[in-house]
């Protein structure tokens, strides 16, 4: 997969997760597979509405469906979430490193300022 494909997948996944209903569906699926009817229970929307949300999550690669006789459970694709987590962590760690360097620089500057201030106070 090239960088453009990876970016497209990230875009679709983050766009799908921008909706609070879809985030709640993902949260529910993290506890195990569920049918559309089961996923629709806590919401004040129709099963057709939930099905549309599931199609968005499916097209983003975050969930899959299987067939179990008459049941069509929806499953969370944990690997897809792991990809998002890795992306977030990579950028979070980069930002944290920059803040640590800034903190160290400020601490050094504060120490230098304090030492200079001590010298000025002595007669």
Image (cartoon, grey):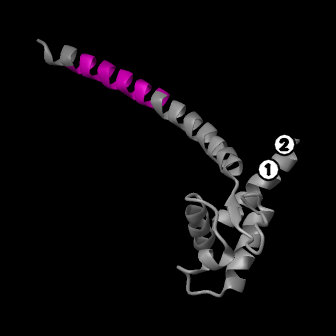
Residue at the limit of the structure toward the left, as seen here: 123
Residue 113: image quadrant is top left
Whether residue 88 appears in magenta in the rendering, the answer is no
Using the image as rendered, state which of residue 18 and residue 46 is in the foreground: 46
Q: Position of residue 35 (x, y in %)?
A: 67, 72
**Front-most of residues 78 and 36:** 36
| Element carrying mark 2 | helix
Q: Which residue is mark 2?
A: 3
Image marks 1 and 2: residues in contact by CB distance under 8 Å: yes
- Main SS class of the magenta portion in the image: helix
Disc 1 on helix, strand or loop?
helix
Q: Which residues are magenta?
A: 101-117
**Placement of 58 over or under 45, stated as above or below:** above
Asked if residue 31 is positioned above or below residue 103 in the image, the reply reads below
Q: Is residue 103 above or below residue 65?
A: above
Question: Residue drawn at (59%, 40%), measured in percent from left and top?
Answer: 89
Asked if residue 111 lies in the magenta stretch, the reply is yes
Q: Residues within 10 Å of mark 2 (few under 14, many from 20)?
A: few
- Which numbered marker is on residue 7? 1
**Few, some or many residues within 10 Å of mark 1 (<14, 14–19, 20+):** few
């Amino acid at each position: 997969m090239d960088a453009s494909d990876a970016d497209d997948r990230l875009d679709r996944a983050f766009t799908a997760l921008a909706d609070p209903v879809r985030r709640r569906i993902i949260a529910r699926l993290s506890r195990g597979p569920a049918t559309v009817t089961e996923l629709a229970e806590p919401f004040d929307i129709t099963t057709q509405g939930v099905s549309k949300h599931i199609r968005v999550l499916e097209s983003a690669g975050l969930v899959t469906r299987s067939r179990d006789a008459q049941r069509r459970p929806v499953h969370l694709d944990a690997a897809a979430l792991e990809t998002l987590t890795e992306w977030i962590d990579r950028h979070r760690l980069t930002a944290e490193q920059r803040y640590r360097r800034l903190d160290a620089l400020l601490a050094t500057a504060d120490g230098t300022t304090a030492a200079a201030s001590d010298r000025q106070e002595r007669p």
